[in-house]
Image (tube, rainbow, N blue to C red):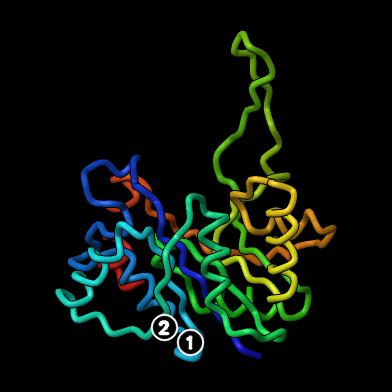
């Protein structure tokens, strides 16, 4: 079965600070987004990579590809006004076929493992949709009133969501169409699938599969790179 990965890299990086968007920040001397794409390609060169970038970042991307001699084969397309629209644009670049699996991955998660990737694709092939999650280590509290009152939340009932989220192509197309027709704002692709009444298979994620959104995240990522992750 044909496999695709839509890599979404449309964030402005406001929490990262600085003028350069987070996906172009340097991680051990190379833009984060390039590290992510090289990791995916090294795990499975047969996957078709689709990179979704804001139109205003295309020229920067092309210049960076020349500067860093970046040669991973991929399809490049413009992002939309939201993540939902960016995924739609990425999906539009997929061949007109009915038998494929589509992964959606954050461009600033450069440490996805081969095991997580393989597990997500395998479970999506069996169940139609799969999502990696990890346990929450910290205690949680729920705000229950405007006066600042809180209550303890049992953390064993909750999980942190990672990417890639992987779907049967027909299922993802139907989910995005439904969300578009209803005018629903979707920030998580699995939630769109669940609105069709489908269950999403949970896959064990990896605590090293971090999302780089803050300067601290970038420092942790540098340590992971130096440690050979």
Q: Is residue 50 above or below residue 180?
A: below
Indicate the secondary structure of the residue bearing disc 2.
helix
Q: Is mark 2 in CB contact (under 8 Å) with mark 1?
A: yes
Viewer-nearest residue: 154 or 68:
68
Viewer-nearest residue: 110 or 225:
110
The label number, if any, that marks residue 96 in the structure image: none
The label number, if any, that marks residue 44 in the structure image: 1
Indicate the secondary structure of the residue bearing disc 1.
loop
Distance in Å between CA atoms under marks 2 and 1? 5 Å
Quarter where residue 163 is shown: bottom right
Viewer-nearest residue: 62 or 137:
62
Q: Quadrant of the N terminus?
A: bottom right
Q: Residue at x 27, y 59 (%)?
A: 24
Q: Residue at x 58, y 64 (%)?
A: 88
Q: Is residue 47 left or right of residue 76?
A: right
Q: Is residue 12 above or below residue 94?
A: above
Give x and y (percent) for residue 211: 43, 55
Provide the residue designation for mark 2: 41
Q: Residue at x 69, y 19 (%)?
A: 144
Give x and y (percent) for residue 216: 31, 45
Circle 1 residues within 10 Å: few <14, some 14–19, many ≥20: few
């Amino acid at each position: 079965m044909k496999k695709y990965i839509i890599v979404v890299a449309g964030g402005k990086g406001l929490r990262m600070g600085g003028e350069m968007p987070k996906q172009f920040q340097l991680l051990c001397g190379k833009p984060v987004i390039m590290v992510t794409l090289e990791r995916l390609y090294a795990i499975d060169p047969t996957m078709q990579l689709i990179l979704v970038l804001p139109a205003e970042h295309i020229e920067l991307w092309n210049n960076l590809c020349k500067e860093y001699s970046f040669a991973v084969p991929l399809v490049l397309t413009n992002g939309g006004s939201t993540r939902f629209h960016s995924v739609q644009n990425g999906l539009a670049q997929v061949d007109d076929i009915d038998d494929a699996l589509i992964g959606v991955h954050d461009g600033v998660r450069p440490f996805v493992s081969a095991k997580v990737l393989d597990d997500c694709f395998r479970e999506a092939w069996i169940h139609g949709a799969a999502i990696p999650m990890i346990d929450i280590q910290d205690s949680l509290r729920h705000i229950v009133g405007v006066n600042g009152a809180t209550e303890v939340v049992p953390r064993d009932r909750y999980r942190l969501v990672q990417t890639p989220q992987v779907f049967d192509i027909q299922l993802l197309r139907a989910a995005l169409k439904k969300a578009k027709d209803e005018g629903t704002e979707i920030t998580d692709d699995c939630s769109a699938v669940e609105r069709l009444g489908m269950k999403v298979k949970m896959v064990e994620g990896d605590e090293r599969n971090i999302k780089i959104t803050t300067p601290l995240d970038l420092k942790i990522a540098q340590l992971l790179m130096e440690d050979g992750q």
